Image (spheres, rainbow, N blue to C red):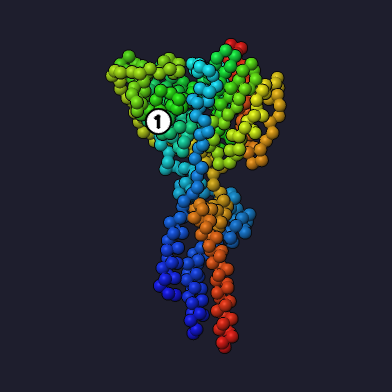
Amino acid sequence: MNCFLRARLQIATLALFSALGLKSAKAEEVYLPPADFIAQSFENTPEQKVLWFTAETKAGIRKVFGEDYPGLRIRYWRAGDRTAWILEAIGKVKLITTGFLIENERLLQMRVLIYRESHGWEVRYPFFTNQFKGLELESDAKLSQNIDGISGATLSVNALTRLAQLALYLHGQVISE
Amino acid sequence: MPLRRKKILALHRWLGLLSALFLVVLSITGLALNHTERLGLDGIRVKSDLLLKCYGMQGQGDLKAFSIHGNDTLTHLGDQLYYNESPLASTATPLAYYSGENFTVIACPDHFVLLDPAGQLIEAIETDGLPFEKVNAAGRSPEGAVILVAENGLWKPDNEWLHFNPYSGPYTVKTLPAASLPKNVSSAILAHHQGQGLSLYRVLLDLHAGRLFGWGGRTLMDLTAVAILLLISSGLTSWFKKSRRA
């Protein structure tokens, strides 16, 4: 084998070995910082409040969310009958951070704010999130309309649907206080 | 020997040498995968920290444990914080803590974690959106109030931890003392972090396909497959030329 071919083979081999171990990793995607979501939700950003979870609230959360929500209290923003919530749930293995804006027991807006999973990010697009507009919480703890899923994003869709139910439930709790 | 045949033989030799190791890996892993059930590969769990890291999992060596509330422990693994063996919140490694009468606050660079005296999570507050972004420590004023030491100064939270006011005055910081974890606690944390763990079947399958080493490994296995085709064609060509001459 001539020197030229040998040198090229050696370079190619070195390049391949140096490429070993490199893994593509999708970092978290911040679509809208939570603080910006809150600022956009109100004319004048109201002060934060906290809702403490009583035993009754916890039982209600389990019913609408299917499991306990972490912690003993949660922050929210309220101006009149309008409330905003930043809620998180695991899609498949990572947390999805979402913003919910609710008025008069109806969802005005649902936004995916931070997405950390490697798949299923399509849930951020309006064709999906617009389905939540105007929905209410029914007496059976389900949303007033079915949410159409997205192929390959079933777990994220389920997580966001459960979070929407939770947001509506929590809104009901603070409005009735 | 004609020059062209010499070149083909040289190419055959170098291709064989370069791809030999990968062919051996392909053969052995292929044989093992073909007998997955008989060898019980699905039931064998891989414990190697190095391999677990390849899958984004962390192992025993990555546990960072601190002593809190006397005999309890605070452990950080991956991006998860644990109180004894119970998962608390997804945070960066904790820096310091302040223990009050009604609650304990753990300061992490990106979060405050509030616990009740029993170690139950009250709330994990992200520093994003607060008057400061990065917190370096949590301290105590001479009056006993919590003082947050952030990059942009000192802050004093109100009783509900909803508002933070600038603070200027003396304070002391209590750092987290390192602790050694009891075996049952570290096992429970690792089980939570790693889930069902990593099976030998998954490792062999990814080694076979080269996925274990990311796109570089996949490309290498692709090139090995191409090398096999070239070896076959260069071997046959050389053999035909030799037999024609004979």
Q: Nearer the viewer, residue B72 or B193?
A: B193
| Residue kind at label 1, given as amino acid type | Pro
Q: Is residue A149 above or below residue B155?
A: below
Counting labels gives 1
From where the camera sits, is residue B108 visible? no
Q: Residue A101 in the image: state x and y as whole percent.
A: 58, 22
Position of A28 with respect to B108 (left or right) is right
Q: Residue B146 in the image: state x and y as whole percent.
A: 37, 19
- For the N terminus of chain A, the image quarter is bottom left
Furthest residue to the bottom? Answer: B246
- For the C terminus of chain A, the image quarter is top right
The structure residue drawn at horizontal position 56% and vertical position 87%, both measured from the top left corner, is B245
Furthest residue to the front? Answer: A43
Position of A65 with respect to B221 (left or right) is right
Q: Residues within 10 Å of mark 1 (few under 14, many from 20)?
A: many
Q: Nearer the viewer, residue A177 or B2?
A: B2
Q: Which residue position holds label 1?
A: B109
The structure residue drawn at horizontal position 60% and vertical position 57%, both measured from the top left corner, is B33
Q: Is residue A36 above or below residue B191?
A: above
The structure residue drawn at horizontal position 34% and vertical position 20%, both measured from the top left corner, is B140
Q: Residue B52 in the image: state x and y as whole percent.
A: 49, 47
Q: Residue B45 in the image: state x and y as whole percent.
A: 54, 48
From where the camera sits, is residue B18 visible? yes
**Would you identify the image quadrant in which residue B240 lies?**
bottom right
Q: Is residue B112 above or below residue B188?
A: above
Furthest residue to the top? Answer: A177
Q: Nearer the viewer, residue B67 or B22?
A: B22
